[in-house]
Amino acid sequence: MHRRYGLGAIQKRQQKEALFKEKSDEIAKEQLQKLKEQMDVFRNHLQVFAAKHKKAIRKNAEFRRQFQEMCATVGVDPLQSSNTFWSKLLGVGDFYYEIAIQVIEVCMASSHINGGIITVDELLTKVKASRNAAKLKNDEITVDDILRAINKLSVLGNGLKVLKFEKTYVVQSVPKELSMDHNAILQLAQSNGGYVYKDLIVSKLNWSEHRVVKIINDLIMEGIVWIDKQSENGQEWYWFPGLS
């Protein structure tokens, strides 16, 4: 015969559960408050550190990267806006928006050659040249700075996209939405010195010739691919100026 619990026993158990939950909530609240206080202390120390090393953060790329990693641990983004406390203190917000504008200028100026596809290393070289011409060469910049600047542009829409390949990053400024097939050929070309040919694509990607021709024609129409009809192996070579 099953034993039945009386109403009093049920109420007593519910009271215990309520007390346990209340105590748990109280402990969690205390722990959260302590954590908040610790984070506030860390942020204050971070502000003092930033003010003391402002020039190094602005001028030294590696120091700047490490500082941003410290900021990330406490949920601070000094690049979020050019008008934030951190941006005013360090000037890094303006620094990255400045780089972002130069990235756009380089992409626009070179798009008639590369069809809007460029490796981040070449982009960095061109941005550095632009900054040198503008007498901004005292600011050391790196690939990491270029990627951070592009990331800040994402709030404006899908103007620039970063593609991660095995050996590098490729920046896409072409308005066309590239498919997985397009990206597969781009990645193959990047690993092959900036060019591909039909037999190579068929062999490496296991595609039919019809599929190869269709995707290559798409890329030619977008100006991303140039054709070399005087190649060494007698086949047409498809060059990607932005990857070579």
Image: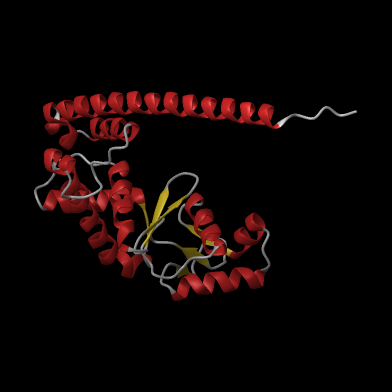
In this view, the residue in front, 68 or 6, is 6
**Position above or below: 53 against 157:** above
In this view, the residue in front, 41 or 34, is 34
Give the side of residue 111 with respect to residue 190, left or right: left
Residue drawn at x 62%, y 26% is 12
Residue drawn at x 32%, y 70% is 112
In the rendered view of the protein, which quadrant contains the N terminus? top right
**Colour pattern:** secondary structure
The image quadrant that residue 213 belongs to is bottom right
**Position above or below: 29 against 125:** above
Residue drawn at x 49%, y 65% is 178
Residue lying furthest right: 1
Residue drawn at x 67%, y 28% is 8
In this view, the residue in front, 80 or 143, is 80
Residue 37 location in percent, x, y? 28, 25
Give the side of residue 243 with respect to residue 13, left or right: left
**Position above or below: 86 against 36:** below
Residue 122 location in percent, x, y? 32, 51
In the rendered view of the protein, which quadrant contains the C terminus? bottom left
In this view, the residue in front, 47 or 225, is 47
Residue 206 location in percent, x, y? 68, 59
Residue lying furthest left: 135
The image quadrant that residue 210 belongs to is bottom right
The image quadrant that residue 2 belongs to is top right
Q: How many marks?
A: 0
Residue 236 location in percent, x, y? 53, 68
